[in-house]
Amino acid sequence: MAKLKIVKFGDPMLRKVSRPVDTITPRIQTLIDDMIETMRDAGGCGLAAVQVGVLRRIVVIEVEEGKVYVMINPKIVAFAGEQQDNEGCLSNPGNYGITKRPKAVTVKATDRHGKEYELTGTDLLARAICHECDHLDGKLYTDVQIRPLTPEELS
Ligand code: NI
């Protein structure tokens, strides 16, 4: 596995729309392993392939230690409720904002073995799913934030 360089806010790459994956090749498997390692090393709870410079619809999420969700071609199929909380991004280190997101989200995705699955997440997992799926369409949390956290709130 290898640690990859994370693309930062301001890079036009992050505004691009990622392409679907149709075949899960060994290269894609390696990319997924590297994304997991990169996310963990950076102390994040989610990472999209575009953040490591690959415009494919792949997301990894780990909001609970040891429980990694790999989502290939994820699609949010249902959402409910509302929550407001802090949100950050590994592409925007040290910054956070308050965002409004659904309280619960159901996503359909393919896992790394090519099996389709459906997952419903609430709270932090719901936020992570929304945040990472947005990356695949070139959207950033700052597009939907209500306001950034102030330096006082950050310290
Ligand atoms: Ni992000």
Image (cartoon, helix red, strand yellow):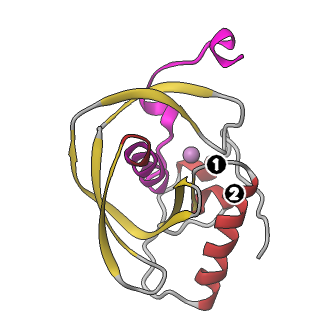
> Could you tell me which residue is drawn at 64 percent across and 85 percent down?
27
Q: Amino acid at mark 2?
A: Arg
Q: Residues within 10 Å of mark 2 (few under 14, many from 20)?
A: some
Extent of the magenta region: 126-155
Q: Is residue 131 magenta?
A: yes
* In the image, residue 138 lies in the stretch drawn in magenta: yes
Please give the label number shown on residue 18: none
Q: Nearer the viewer, residue 63 or 93?
A: 63
Q: Secondary structure at mark 2?
A: helix
State the image coordinates of residue 108 (x, y, percent, origin top left).
29, 67
The amino acid type, in three-letter code, at marker 1 is Gly
Q: Residues within 10 Å of mark 1 (few under 14, many from 20)?
A: some
For residue 119, side relative to residue 40 (left or right): left
Q: In this rendering, is residue 37 above or below 148?
A: below
Look at the numbered discs 2 and 1 and tell me whether their residues touch, using CB distance below 8 Å.
yes
Main SS, magenta region, reads: helix
Q: Secondary structure at mark 1?
A: loop
Q: Residue at x 67, y 81 (%)?
A: 30
Which residue carries the number 2 mark? Answer: 40
Q: Which residue ends up furthest to the front in the rendered image?
A: 65
Instruction: Place residue 155 in its image quadrant.
Output: top right
Location of the N terminus by quadrant is bottom right
Q: Is mark 1 within 8 Å of ligand 1?
A: yes
The residue carrying mark 2 has its beta carbon less than 8 Å from ligand 1: no
Q: Nearer the viewer, residue 137 or 60?
A: 60
Q: Which residue is mark 1?
A: 44
Residue at 42% x, 73% y: name it. Answer: 20
Residue 76 position in % (x across, y down): 29, 56
- In the image, farthest residue toward the top: 152
